[in-house]
């Protein structure tokens, strides 16, 4: 994994982005944004695209990029929606960047890469390629905020958490997926990662909402998760693994709440 140095002052930018979303830095740090679970209900409709833009070369973002709800889709070297790990992203966000009001169509290549703290606001993936977004910051103070938006048709992961820091996913929806969030199980450089998932609609089929590495000190907190179409409760809310830094397939060691790695109770989930 390529290392990227943080630039001074960028954390202010991402906290500013979080504040615009109604998520303060203090809320992220203290987890006070995690509200009690509510009743299951209808999933909100996806937005209609307002035009289309083919992307042949990765778009680099520093500051704020407003896609105005256009559909961005890969072409040329980005014209793939397969599972090749070496694919390039449609967008790469520098430390502190904000990407908002974007629909990523198909081919989606490797979606979005965040090189440090970032905010993804109202970003929608119509057909996830390799991953919807990958978080790659190397500082423990990095904060990655996904607020609003949704993803469909992810044969494996939606959000790949390779770096250090904290990932907060709120007011998101996902359908037909493998894992919503996966803490990297076999990256060469490993970290203790913090994951908060709150106010999210999950529609079957799916395998797991969150996968974390218990041996590296990961934590996953789930609140207000509404699960649709999974009467037999096949979707695992939180799966624990023994991760490694050798590239080997990580070992699954358990599922369900344990109060340490997987932090939630039955009342944090609702089914319809």
Image (cartoon, grey):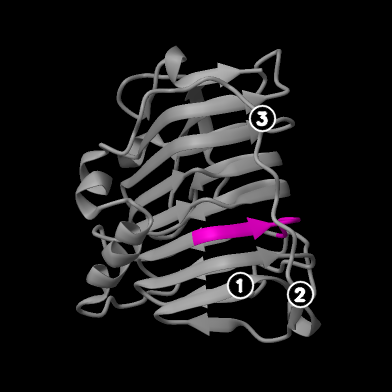
67 to the left or right of 119 = right
In screen coordinates, is 171 left or right of 257?
A: right
Which residue does the image show at 60% across and 42% down from the upper left? Answer: 173
Is 86 or 29 nearer to us in this picture? 29
Residue bearing the label numbered 3: 42
- The quadrant in which residue 213 appears is top left
**Which residue bears the numbered disc 2?**
51
Q: Earlier in the sequence, mark 2 or mark 3?
A: 3
Label 1 residue SS: strand
Quarter holding residue 80: bottom right
Look at 43% across and 70% down and name the residue there. Answer: 98
Judge whether residue 122 is colored magenta: yes
Residue 207 visible: no
Do residues under tags 2 and 3 come within 8 Å of each other at their CB atoms? no
Q: Position of residue 20 (x, y in %)?
A: 35, 61
- In depth, the one of 240 and 155 nearer the eye is 155
Point out residue 62 in the picture as x, y percentages from the top left corner: 42, 82
Evaluate if marks 1 and 2 touch, with contact meaning CB atoms under 8 Å apart: yes
Q: Which residue is mark 1?
A: 68
Residues drawn in magenta: 121-129
Disc 2 from disc 3: Cα separation: 27 Å
Residue 225 marker: none
User: Is 86 located above or below residue 63 in the figure?
Assistant: above
Of residues 121 and 262, the one nearer the viewer is: 121
Q: 10 Å neighbourhood of mark 1: few (<14), some, or many (≥20)?
A: few
Residue 178, horizontal then vertical, whole percent: 67, 40
């Amino acid at each position: 994994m390529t290392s990227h140095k943080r630039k001074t002052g960028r954390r202010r930018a991402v906290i500013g982005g979080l504040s615009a979303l109604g998520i303060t830095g203090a809320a992220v740090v203290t987890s006070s944004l995690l509200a009690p679970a509510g009743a299951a209900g209808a999933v909100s409709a996806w937005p209609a695209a307002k035009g289309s833009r083919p992307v042949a070369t990765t778009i680099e973002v520093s500051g704020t990029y407003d896609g105005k709800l256009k559909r961005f889709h890969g072409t040329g070297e980005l014209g793939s929606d397969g599972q090749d790990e070496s694919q390039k992203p449609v967008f790469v966000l520098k430390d502190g960047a904000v990407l908002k009001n974007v629909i990523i169509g198909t081919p989606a290549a490797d979606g979005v890469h965040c090189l440090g703290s970032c905010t993804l606001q109202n970003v929608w993936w119509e057909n996830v390629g390799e991953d919807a977004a990958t978080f790659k910051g190397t500082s423990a103070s990095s904060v990655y905020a996904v607020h609003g938006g949704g993803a469909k048709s992810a044969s494996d992961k939606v959000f790949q958490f390779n770096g250090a820091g904290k990932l907060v996913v709120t007011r998101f929806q996902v359908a037909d997926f493998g894992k919503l969030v996966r803490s990297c199980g076999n990256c060469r450089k490993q970290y203790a990662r913090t994951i908060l998932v709150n106010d999210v609609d999950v529609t079957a089929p799916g395998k797991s909402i969150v996968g974390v590495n218990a041996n590296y000190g990961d934590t996953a907190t789930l609140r207000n998760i509404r699960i649709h179409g999974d009467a037999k409760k096949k979707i695992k809310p939180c799966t624990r693994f023994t991760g490694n830094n050798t590239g080997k397939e990580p070992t699954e060691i358990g599922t369900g709440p344990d109060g340490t790695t997987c932090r939630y109770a039955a009342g944090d989930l609702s089914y319809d």
